[in-house]
Image (tube, grey):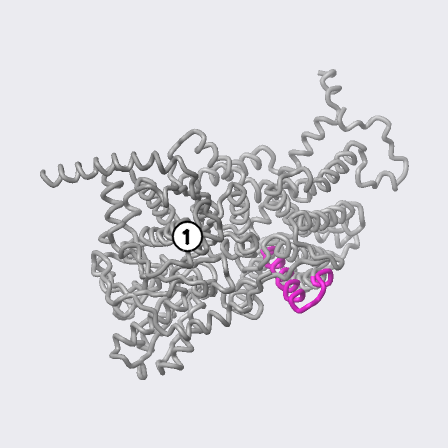
Amino acid sequence: MFYRLSGIHHANYVSDSRIFKVPADRNLAAFVFLFGLAAPFILPSLYLNSYMLPWLIWTAAALGLNLVTGWAGQLHLGYAAVMAVGAYSAIHAARFGVPWEFALIIGGLASSVIGSLFAFAALRVKGLYLALTTLAMQFVMDWVLTHSPAISGGSHASLQSPTLALLGQEITSDTGYYYVAFGWCVLVTIFMLNLKRTGLGRALVAVREKDFAAAILGVNSFYYKILAFATSSFIAGVSGALLVATFFFLAAPEQFSVAVSIQVLAMVIVGGLGSIIGSYFGVALILLVPGLVNGFVATASQSLGMQINVETLAHIPNAVYGALIVIILLIEPLGLGKLYGNIRDYLLVWPFDQLRK
Amino acid sequence: MKIKQHIKAVALTAALAASATVATAQDKEAIRFGLCFDLSKSYTFISPQVAQAAQDLAMYTNDNGGIEGHPVEIVVRDHGNEPQRGVECYEQLKREGVFIFNFLSTPVTNAALPRVMKDSNILMQSAVGRGDAVDGEVFKWVFPVGPTYWQQAANDVAFIKDQLGGNLDNAKIGFIYLDYPFGQEPIEILKTLSKKEGFELELYPVPLPGSDQSGAWSKIRRDKPDYVISWLLAGGHVVASKEMRRNRFPIDRYLSVNWMNEVDIRNIGEQEAKGVLRGTNVAGGQEVPIVKTMLDTYYANGKGSGPEEKVRDVYYNLGLAIYSAGFEAARLGIKESGWPLTPENMKAGYESIEGFDANGLMAPVTVTSEDHGGGGKTRVEQWDGESWVPLTDWSAEYTDVVWEVIKESSEAFIVE
């Protein structure tokens, strides 16, 4: 009923390969997009700059990781390192006087080069071995950042980002930062939506399912793997640069540590491998829920007048958060994206399916 | 018996007086201190003690009439050492009217610093964050009251010079450190001092998290330095003590950074650790007047803000020191410019702190608009098997050299 299928016939390939085959999906996406556009006027500034903005940037980053892990099936444990390459190259470029538009592209390209350079070495191995090689990249990057003051910005290892300016316009307000993040996230999402229906997307899926089977079909798996790494690294690089330019305002090695790599991977897995909407949900769960639960527990204990030790208070949200992840993955191992898909499938014919029973 | 009755009487009158003053203190608006701490991940070795100290000190202050009649409120939140959540905590508390912040984590402080500077709020960052923030002319809103790692290292060298008879010409000083920015920070100043004083400097990097030190210590055994200055953390000291025993390096030549507490000492073994040295800007032990007061007034009656065990820890004293300076700044701010307390008044309050030592709790600090560190005085204390014994007086040496490094680093920071 909500996702009406009546009267929808795909009579040709163009119509069949549309992004949104059901009008309800398209309307929903349009609604979410409009909400995103209007968010600065609807949401209080706290939600805008400490929840929405990081959520959108991390979603863009997670979508990039989803490309290589969800679509091409290559486990990547060094994604934060790739983001760091982008962030540091873009900031250094911007500090050098390069306009931000180009600095961001430089960041993306630098990530792309380093990311696929490692992939070259890494792609001689598969599965867990590949995962370990990418993990090695993370450690190499950590080491480089903590041992080269020229890159990391002095003995304190914090590198200030110059004021972001796009199209000759200095961006300093929360609303401005939000729109930059929103724009980037929308761009990546559109790219990913389209990827599904291109030859490249299908080739990546073929490589994921069985790379030698793909080779028999004439898909050069090595080429597509490299391409996946390069593309996802580009997205990572720009996302990393934007994260620093619009949220942290200075780059420090801890913002791109191995823990962050694991976190992004968790976002993708909890969200659902190969699911776009899942990435949005996954990021929300991993990134925002700890803070929200923390605030909730703090207010709850305060309003109930409970005298809880600060340490216990800090650990309750962690327990809740951990339990949430386990419960979600128990209910639906394919992640939050699949959970949404289940609900959608149920509502597709509801309530008419009830008549049969 | 008599003494007990006496104490009871004193406590009773104190309680009565307190309840009377509490009534007046709570009529007025509160001064709120925001503590966005890492209470669940990397900094848990220190943050609970500091938070507890802040809460105890606030309770004590409120029981005694508050700060110029205004009660103090401590707001504690966890950020799990994640920069993103630290920023979120800052943004949230900022909107709730808090303008005095402490993040007690270097990554999170760094992430919040640009925002705090832009919003002109007060950032207390003693013991964490970038060292050049003591330069008050650049970092107007940052108050890292206490020594920088540079100053601490310089004071350590001065101590060694003193111990070796005032001459370092033939001396050899080893520096064992965790090989990441925290440990690397003092290297530059040590190199400068080595040139100036003519001692030989040997560097012994240790990979994170400091559990593998065997290579470094066998090198130390060969090099035979007169003293080893250590920039290790928590468990690193325990590993170092084992290695020292194995390599026959006397533990009383091991001079630790301020990050060594009773937990580490217990892990080494209280008797084993006898003789170990520690540079500090806060007096250790429970004989310090304010710590004694806390134990007697609150913990003896089971009214402390947390377990008593945490009070018997030098990091509790550190927490008291940080917040004593903060409360003193608030008091001076209100006294000078009246209520309401604004970030500007608080800043002015901080900058008029003069020779303040919180009744023997810490090195006397004099904060000025140029020096937000308050002078960077430290002393060296030695573990005698039961408690910390001071070996020297509070002092800050080689300040000219240290300030050169500070200025060189701070001038790269652009304030928008």
- State the image coordinates of residue A268 (x, y, percent, origin top left): 62, 45
Tell which of B52 and A240 is nearer to you.
B52
Q: Is residue A106 left or right of residue B147?
A: right
- State the image coordinates of residue B91 (x, y, percent, origin top left): 55, 46
User: Which image quadrant for residue B281?
Assistant: bottom left
Q: Is residue A243 left or right of residue A193?
A: left
> Which residue is tagged 1?
B336
- Kindly identify which chain the residue marked by label 1 belongs to: B
Q: Is residue A256 left or right of residue B77?
A: right
User: Which image quadrant for residue A306?
Assistant: top left
Residue B209 is at least partly visible in this image: yes
Asked if residue A274 is among those painted magenta in the image, a careful observer would answer no
Q: Does residue A22 sit above or below A87 in this rendering?
A: above
Residue B306 is at least partly visible in this image: no
Q: Secondary structure at mark 1?
A: helix
Magenta residues: mostly which secondary structure?
helix
Image quadrant occupied by the C terminus of chain B? bottom right
Image quadrant occupied by the N terminus of chain B? top left
Q: Residues within 10 Å of mark 1 (few under 14, many from 20)?
A: some
Residue sticking out furthest to the left: B2
Asked if residue A86 is among those painted magenta in the image, a careful observer would answer yes
Span highlighted in magenta in the image: A78-103
Q: Amino acid at mark 1?
A: Glu
Q: Does residue A343 sit above or below A61 in this rendering?
A: above
- State the image coordinates of residue A208 (x, y, percent, origin top left): 69, 49
- State the image coordinates of residue B13 (x, y, percent, origin top left): 21, 36
State the residue at coordinates (70%, 52%): A211
State the residue at coordinates (34%, 75%): B173
Tell which of B383 and B339 is nearer to you.
B339
State the residue at coordinates (55%, 50%): A262
Residue sticking out furthest to the right: A11
